[in-house]
Amino acid sequence: TSFATLVRDRLDPKRHAYFELSDKVWDGANFATADYFRQLANTWYGSTSVESCMDAYGGRSAEVFTAIRAVWAGQLSRLHTVLQGWTPVPTLSVNVFTAPQWRALGSGRPEPWTLATEYAVHCNMDGAMRGTDPEAGYDAVAEIQGWMDTLTDAEIYANMIQALRGTHPIV
């Protein structure tokens, strides 16, 4: 909370702050970050699978976002909390958004997506969503833009989770 307090107190009041716990937590070449979440997943769940690591990232993000939101109480309109997903393996993003293993550790733990105000997409937003299919007359980008224009945040995340699981009509 010290860093969140420093940023809150020193950042020009006209500016916004974006907090993201980490980046590319699945990347074995990013040894420090990946190793941290592997160790955390092993401690929490007894597993070092990439699915457990992504779940641990989601859970730890929820904890950090909760602490930061407490520091920024009264100024939440300036605060942005960011979860990152990985589209080449969409099911891993579902683990980040929902963190089922972390939530099972104790009652009242929220799904991480409910504490995030932003979603950062790593590299390529195609995963199972290929964008457009002119022959079928379909444009997934337009579909997602429609969500952003008409749905609540909860509905947008629910649709993204379905899309990442491959159970939404856009995939």
Image (tube, rainbow, N blue to C red):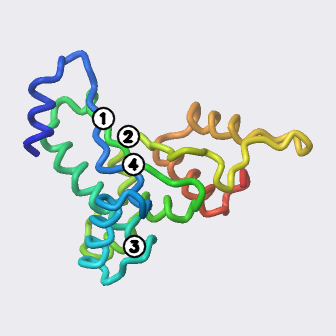
Chain-order first, disc 2 or disc 1? 1
Q: CA distance from mark 2 to mark 4?
A: 8 Å
Chain-order first, disc 3 or disc 1? 1
Q: Nearer the viewer, mark 3 or mark 2?
A: 3
Q: CA distance from mark 3 to mark 2?
A: 23 Å
User: Which residue, as the protein is rendered here, is positioned at the far bottom?
Assistant: 46
Q: Which residue is mark 3?
A: 52
Q: Which residue is mark 2?
A: 117
Q: Residue at x 81, y 41 (%)?
A: 138
Q: Which residue is mark 4?
A: 83
Quadrant of residue 147 within the rendered picture: top right
Q: Residue at x 50, y 49 (%)?
A: 157
Q: CA distance from mark 3 to mark 1?
A: 25 Å
Residue 70 image offset from top left, x and y in percent: 15, 44
Residue 118 image offset from top left, x and y in percent: 41, 40
Q: Nearer the viewer, residue 55 or 33?
A: 33
Q: Nearer the viewer, residue 149 or 17?
A: 17
Give above or below for 20 relative to 42: above
Task: Name the amino acid, label 1.
Answer: Tyr
Chain-order first, disc 4 or disc 3? 3
